Image: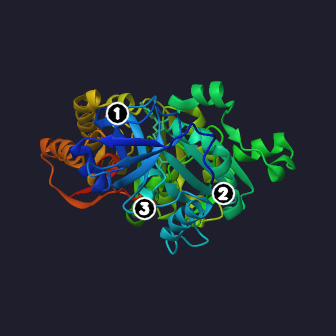
Amino acid sequence: MSEPSLPSPRLRLRVSPTAESVLRAGHPWLFSESIRDQNRSGILGELAVIYDRQDRFLAFGLYDPGSPIRVRILHRGRPATLDAAWWERRLRDSLERRVGLFDEQTTGYRAIHGENDGWPGLVLDRYDSAWVLKLYTAAWLPRLGEVSALFRTALQPRALVLRLSRNIQDIARDQFRLTEGVLADGADASMEPATSSAALRRQRFLESGLSFEADLLQGQKTGFFLDQRENRRRVEAVASGREVLNAFSFSGGFSLYAARGGAHAVTDLDISEHALESARRNFALNSTHSAVAQCRHRLIQADAFAWLEQNRDARFDLIILDPPSLARREAERAAAIQAYGRLATSALRTLRDRGILVAASCSAHVSATEFYGAVTEALRRTGRPYHELARTGHPPDHWWTFPEAEYLKCLYVALV
Ligand code: SAH
């Protein structure tokens, strides 16, 4: 991949001793306040080369003058040339890390998980023959053409969809004339545009042999919560004969696994009508599984916190709590921990004896210890005996390699 047209000379940075050792240890972010000097001002997305105090090469990465994370590291260690072969190798490495994880029964998964795969701020998810490229940092915008060409050649997608995190949508539109949607190339242009975008709003794929539809153009994240696959599989294994509440159900992922696992009734509870409508369609899609066809499926559109408070007489044998991130900022951490505790308390009130609670958190600002603490404290206060079945973290296609990237935790407890 060639460099975008650049002012010369190459952008060179020197950083604080602390940053030097942090980068050497593999952390992928260089914050602006750690930069000691630089030979000129840098432009968005250009390659910044970082040297240590002895003027030895340390790392290189993508420069972003508008972000406190000034450089996102692509490579550290020995000097390397960032050419087409380097990018191809990096993509191959990401794909090879997933070899053997999924068979033909699972055609939806994450192929590139940002920093953790060496692609800082970039995610690539596969949904069968359509792929979604989501950017979380503007630093990729000048390179989008080259990156998407690389993905197209290697993956031969039927469609490649661009998604942009909210914070970079303005700059993408104003400076690069880019908006979310299907990335056009020869192949995409040959599809009838209206049909293709309608299809991509209901893109089918398989997860563990279950069929799902995802809205790749507008759905949350890239259309589906691919990161909960392993937890859904565990729920399937304990669902037999149970009456299930799937709170914050989104498109019914946990519910379908519970149904296939032999649950006799499943309730999807979500605040979004659109989410419940996809849950309804996803159930219909799987009626060929006899256990799914036999499972009673109910949809409730409500605020889950309020609904659990107001329906104290409801009873379930398996409750899944998978709220959206309750702490988007560090400042919201304490309130989020309290909210996790409150949610667990109201769920436990409606959980029958021998019932199972599955409580998940996707807030990166709340640590695993804090989250488990909040839920186990709620359990302790009920005075009901319980035992822990499992504590789980990230699935293997969403592995984490530095502390800030760890966000997912899930606790399974059974009342005894
Ligand atoms: N468990 C899901 C993912 C949940 S994402 C899965 O496996 O796919 C979080 C969901 O919570 C979203 O669908 C969102 O619409 C819903 N939500 C957000 N706030 C809510 C609230 N206060 N009450 C109920 N649902 C809410």
Quarter of the image containing the C terminus?
Answer: bottom left
Q: For the image shown, how many numbered marks are present on the structure?
A: 3
Which sits in the foreground, 225 or 161? Answer: 161
Q: Residue at x 37, y 57 (%)?
A: 394
* Image marks 3 and 1: residues in contact by CB distance under 8 Å: no
Which sits in the foreground, 60 or 266? Answer: 60
Considering only order in the chain, which callout, 2 or 1, is on the residue closer to the N terminus?
1
Residue position for label 3:
230
**Hey, which quadrant is residue 391 in on the image?**
bottom left
Residue position for label 2:
150
Which amino acid does the dot numbered 1 rest on?
Ser
Q: Secondary structure at mark 3?
A: helix
Residue position for label 1:
32
Q: CA distance from mark 1 to mark 2?
A: 30 Å
In x, y percent, where is residue 152? 70, 57
Q: Secondary structure at mark 1?
A: helix
Q: Residue at x 32, y 36 (%)?
A: 35
Which amino acid does the dot numbered 2 rest on?
Leu
Considering only order in the chain, which callout, 3 or 2, is on the residue closer to the N terminus?
2
Q: Nearer the viewer, mark 1 or mark 2?
A: 1
Q: CA distance from mark 3 to mark 1?
A: 37 Å
In x, y percent, where is residue 179? 67, 33
